[in-house]
Amino acid sequence: MPKDRKTKQSKQDQQLAAVNRSAKTKKTKTTKQFFSMLGWLFATVHAENRNFLPLYCLSTLLALVRTYLPILVMAPLLQALLAGRAQEAFNLVLLLSLGVFLSDGLHSLIEHALAVQGLDLSRRLRLNMHLHNLDLSYQDVLDQKTKQEFATAMANQNYEMGNFSQVIKRCFSLILHALSFILAFSLSLQMLLSKPWQAGSEFGLSLANPPAWLVNLAQPLPAVLLALGVSLIAIGSNNRVQKRWAAVQRNYLQNHGKVESDLQYFLLQFGLDAKKYAFFQSYNIFGLWEKIKQNLMKSNWDFFYKGFSVNLKQDLANALTNVVILVLSYGLVGLKVLSGAIAITSVVTYVQSFNQLSQSLKQFSSTLLRLRFSIPYLEDMRHFVERENTLYTGTIPVEKRRDDAYTITFDHVSFRYPGAETWALRDINLEFTMREKHALVGPNGSGKTTLILLLCRLYEPTEGRILLNGVDIRKYNYQEYRDLFSVVFQDYQLFAFSLGENVACRMDYDIAKVSDKVLAAGLPPAIASNLDQPVAEKWGSQENFSGGEQQKIAIARALYKPGSLVILDEPTAALDPQSEAEIYARLSDLIQDKTTVFISHRMSSCRFCNDILVLDQGQLVERGGHEDLLQAGGLYSRMWQAQAQYYQD
């Protein structure tokens, strides 16, 4: 062979060897991944419900008893009847009836318990995912990638392939089919290895002079090869069909994820939030509502129709395989009977055992395949559940000070939102003087709320650092640092809990203290004395407090929390000017020993503050007292004059 041909052949061999190594490595990795996912699944389920897995073990054993007791008892029962042994036949019938009754009854009870506990398990795991989402950093939760991962993980549980209890059921079904295969194999092997005419004339239905081809075909080796060949061809063809359509189904689900999340948003925003009904009716938005609904429902229906088509094709493939195996089992047993290899009384036992053998092998292969296709769905959920908080939490404890004398410094802090091109804050240098009242003012988009988010460490600075008593806040224990702040955000949230629970954010609260803070926030004594009343009905169908009262409840919440720094972001937006003045006067007395930061578009609130910070386009442009800033004639003065003129008119 020429040298160049040898070199070319050598390269081809090396490439082929590399491909084989890669395939082997990939297969090994996939197998390890498979068992790793199953280990994680079993550990997760056992941690939530310690009875679930043992119940499935018992259910599996009872299913075996229920299947094989009739198969094992039938042959001796028929022999006893044909031989006229009535007592023996009666005992066998009694054993069979009692065994089937007990195994069937217990199996039904356990299956019912598993169905109930499986539903509870799914709810627990869904709740855990929601709670894990809350544990992530504020920046991570708002990240679009995280949102999509969360939506995908939740959507996977809505479908059979990703439901935890369904996957557990498949695992035990796999064990059941494996054990069933072993039992059926031992019975079927006895039939397949039986030789024609080995028992002479006692097998009365055998042919007197069977054809040579029948005798040859009934011999052990041909019978085994025939059974094995037909079964493997049927099962292999079925598995290829199942694998193909399972991949199609997975593709459908991945493409359907956005439709599912859009539909959930649509239902929550438009179907359950009664607060928006006035807007709907005022703007006659129902035409748009109906159009969006039709588009979403059509997309949803298309997805389920495609899924139904896939399931139908899978069921047809299963049915065809079942027919082939059933015909084979009857054919083989008939062949053995006619050749005199087995007795007529064993027909039922061997037909059922061989059919069970083939079915167990088919079901084992099919279940294993479906279990493997469950792995990507589980991986989506595991990936999200094991997603770590990217926020560095620190370990240094925050100094506990009774005088609340904490100093917070912004050192050349700049911030840009993820994916944004412009800076929200740029080179901010400031120090919050402790136990004073600060006001943050500026036009919309000037960076006021962003500065508060950084101060509360909901976001990390893109550049620079924030210091607490001279130490970078990232070095402090995160929870202890957050406990320093009592915040009323602009988009405050109240829930369909009791008034007391909304204020205290816990079920066990100090009733007297909550009542005191509710009164301090400006709510009347009649409300403060009834802390058990719900703030709203569930699903947003009814609210029991006006917008101004709700804002006062949010302020009472901030007053209840023993934070050293009180931050009020538009705390009086829903209040009239008189109520606003009363709130500010009351707050001035209540939080006189704490550091307070007000954010408000109403410039009148600045009169209660001795330090005013003016932001514009992400930069700190002015700082000082009210009178000094008015005299300076800058942005603050122009904003004040614009509002003063407005009120005057």
Image (tube, helix red, strand yellow):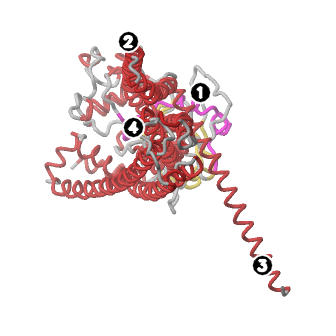
* Marks 4 and 3, the one that precedes in the sequence: 3
Q: Is residue 325 above or below residue 53?
A: below
Work out how far the residue at label 4 is from the one at label 3, CA to CA, in angstroms: 89 Å
Residue bearing mark 2: 512
Work out how far the residue at label 2 is from the one at label 1, CA to CA, in angstroms: 27 Å
Q: Is residue 438 left or right of residue 111?
A: right
Q: Nearer the viewer, mark 3 or mark 1?
A: 3
- Pick the front one: 194 or 248: 194
Residue bearing mark 1: 405
Estimate the x, y position of residue 107 in percent, counting from the top left.
Answer: 40, 24
Q: Secondary structure at mark 3?
A: helix
Q: Nearer the viewer, mark 1 or mark 4?
A: 1
Residue bearing mark 4: 607
* Marks 1 and 4, the one that precedes in the sequence: 1
The amino acid type of the residue labelled 3 equals: Gln
Residues at badges 4 and 3 in contact (C-beta under 8 Å)?
no
Q: Is residue 398 above or below residue 631?
A: above
The span shown in magenta is: 464-493
How many neighbours does mark 1 have within 10 angstroms: few (below 14), some (14-19), or many (20 or more)?
some
